[in-house]
Every structure is written in C-alpha cells, then in structure tokens.
Amino acid sequence: MNKNNITRLVGIDLLRAILIIAGVFYHASLVVAPVSWIYTSPHYDSYAIGLFSEFIHLFRMETFFLLSGFFSTLLIEQKGKVYYIENRKNRILIPSIFLFLLIGIPQYYFLIYDGKFNYDAMISHFWFLQTLIVFIAIHYLYLTKKNYKKHILLSLFLYFLSPPVYYLFSKIEIINLFNSSISQILKYLIYYILGIYLYFNYDELIKKNNFIKITTIAVSTSIILTTLTKTIWDKNGFLLAKTTSIDIILFLEKFTLYDIVTYTLHLINALCISFILIYIFSKINHTSKQIIFIVKSSLCVYILHHPLIIIFGKILDNYNLNLFSYFTLLSTISILIPYFIFYVFRENSFFKKIFGLNSINTQVRNETLESNQEN
C-alpha cells in the first residue's frame, strides 16, 4: 500500500465502526423476527425485519474481519511487530477481559443462563472479540508479507470445513459447549487473511476500472450460483448418497452439494458487498469530531447494547406499541445509552482502559521510532 494513502483511511476506519454499531440493529431485529434468540417478543413476528437482519448478517462480520486483517497488517508494516502486539493488547485483549468480567458474565447469569452451562452462550456477543484475538495471535506468530498468500487456500479449505465440523462436534458433548466458537474461527479466517491481501493490493483494487471489473465478475458469478442453488434445491441433489445410518456417513451427508454451492455463494456475495462498501468509504478523506466520536465509541456501543436490547425488549413489551415504534425505540435506546455513557466517562482513566482508549506505552513507542529510523 502506498504510504501516501495511509492518511486517507478515515472512511475505512469509519466503515469498521459502522459495521460494529450495525450489530445493534441486527440484534434488535432478532427480537421481532420469526427466529429463535435469547429473547423474542411474543407480540411481533415480522418477516420483513427478519429479511433485513439476514441481509445485514450476510456481510457485516465478514467485512469487519476483512478490515481487521487490513488494519492489523497496516500496523505491522508501518510500526513493527512490537508496537503491533502492544497496541492489540491495550486495544483488544485487556478490554475484552475486563468487559467480559464486568458485563459478559453478569449478562449470562442474569439474562441468559437456563440452568445448564454453555460456553458459547456465555461468550454471547463477545464472540467476535474472542475470534479476533485468535486471528491476531495467528497473524503475529505465523503470517508474514512473504507467506500470507499460501494461507489463503488453507483458510478457504477451513471455511468449507466449518459446516461439517460444526455438525460433527455437535455430537460430542464436551466439545459441543465450544462448538460455535470453533466454527466461527474456521469460517471467518478467510476474510481476515483476505484483509491482508487487501492491504498489499489496496491501491490497485480501489482504482475505478478495477472496481468495475471485479464487481461485474462477482455479481455475474453470484447470479450463476444463485441459479445453480435453486436447481440443486429443486432436485434435492446431494454430493454423497445415503448408504448407512453410521454417524460418520451422516456427517458426510451433511456436506451436500447444495451446502457447498450456498457456502460459495455466501463467500462471493459477502466479498462483493465488502468490496463495494470499501470502495465507497475509501472516498471519505476528511475527518471530523463526529467521525472521531463514532469510531472511538463503537466498541462501547457494541458491548453495552446487547444486554440493553434484552432488558428493554422485555420492558417495551409491556406497552401497546406497533411494530415500527417498538423496533425503532428499542434500537434507539440501545444506541443512545452507550453513547451517553461514553460521552460522560470517556476521559476517565479506568473507562479508557477497559474500552481500549489508552495510548501505547511510551517506551514501546520510542523503540518503534528508533527502529523505523534505523530502517
């Protein structure tokens, strides 16, 4: 990536923050959609909002992890690995531990716990921080500018392996407690590594001509695969025929041709939407107080909104509200309260520590500057 473009990443950073905050609307939609969630309102059953949540779910975390790989590579390439790991420790690891202890565990035992321990349920919406920490460790220990391309195929294999692995692990009682956590790592690693690719090829990819070519190819492929998916669904075609009731065969049967095509379709659609969003937001070159506030407060909003949606979802059900009023009010409350808390406490030293707002250690910064001068 051209160093001259680094100062022009305001829009990309804003996109990352918006994707995190979009989780508020996604989780609020689950309360009123015809799906099973931690809390679903007994008064609403909206397919339209359910479709909205599915659309957000198609690309939100995929784009987020892609940008995480992008910004992690930016830090390593520009500041070095010492600065990178110190930054990730202060901005992600320490906040994740503090916030999980302060919010995650109370949320689990007071709002989610049903009498039977489940690790994935306890992690809840902290799963993305947990997954990101794993990717950071992989990046720090294994991925480099020279070898990351070799890992794209491996991560693609793991991506397609995630559905059968999820099914297989669901049959093992102990592992099933961590099943979602394991599957999410397998599923999203491809996006993180493609984020590394995006960094090293950013200048070429965001050129208008290349953007049009890549988008055209992606959309065309998506249309073809969508047609193929419908055909396979209509014919109920399977990659592997039924032969016996043995568990391993049942496991293989879950890896159907339909699943392969739909997973491929999801990957292409998610990358296509991600690329379009990145291209659009890359045109935002100037920062402002509002943008800085949104970016810095995004983690606070995401962490606090989840229990707020559960609590206020139950409270608002006591009032005779129409669907639009209920959904809008629930989303608004779950955003404004975290914004207010962030605004009031943003200069508090403890608050800054638990939400990753602390600056990098002075000694590490000086070592980084000395290293950069030597290079």
Image (spheres, rainbow, N blue to C red):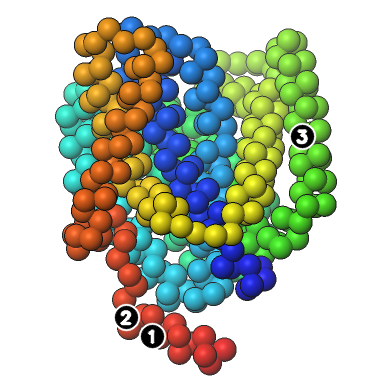
Q: CA–CA distance between discs 2 and 3?
A: 48 Å
Number of marks in the image?
3
* Picture quadrant where residue 35 is located: top left
Residue 310 vs 192, above or below: the answer is: above
Q: Are marks 2 and 3 in contact (CB under 8 Å)?
A: no
Q: Measuring 36% from the left and 9% from the top, which residue is drawn there? A: 322
Pick the residue in front: 10 or 367: 10
Q: Quadrant of the image for the N terminus?
A: bottom right
100 versus 364 height, above or below: above
Which amino acid type is marked by label 3? Val
> Is 24 situated left or right of 315 in this image?
right
Left/right of residue 319 with respect to residue 260 in the rendered view: left
Q: Amino acid at mark 2?
A: Thr
Question: Of helix, strand and loop, which one carries label 2?
Answer: helix
Residue at 63%, 73% in the rendered image: 3
- Mark pair 1, 2: CA separation: 6 Å
Residue 312 rendering spot, x and y as whole percentages: 25, 24
Identity, as a three-letter code, of the amino acid under mark 1:
Asn
Q: Which mark is residue 219?
A: 3
Q: Quadrant of residue 199?
A: bottom right
**Marking on residue 68:** none
Residues at circles 1 and 2 in contact by the CB criterion of under 8 Å: yes
Task: Pick whichever of labels 2 and 3 is earlier in the sequence.
Answer: 3
Q: Pointer 1: what residue?
A: 366
Cα distance, mark 1 to mark 3? Answer: 47 Å
Residue nearest the viewer, comparing 202 with 326: 326
Q: Give the crowd class for mark 2: few <14, some 14-19, many >=20 residues within 10 Å.
A: few
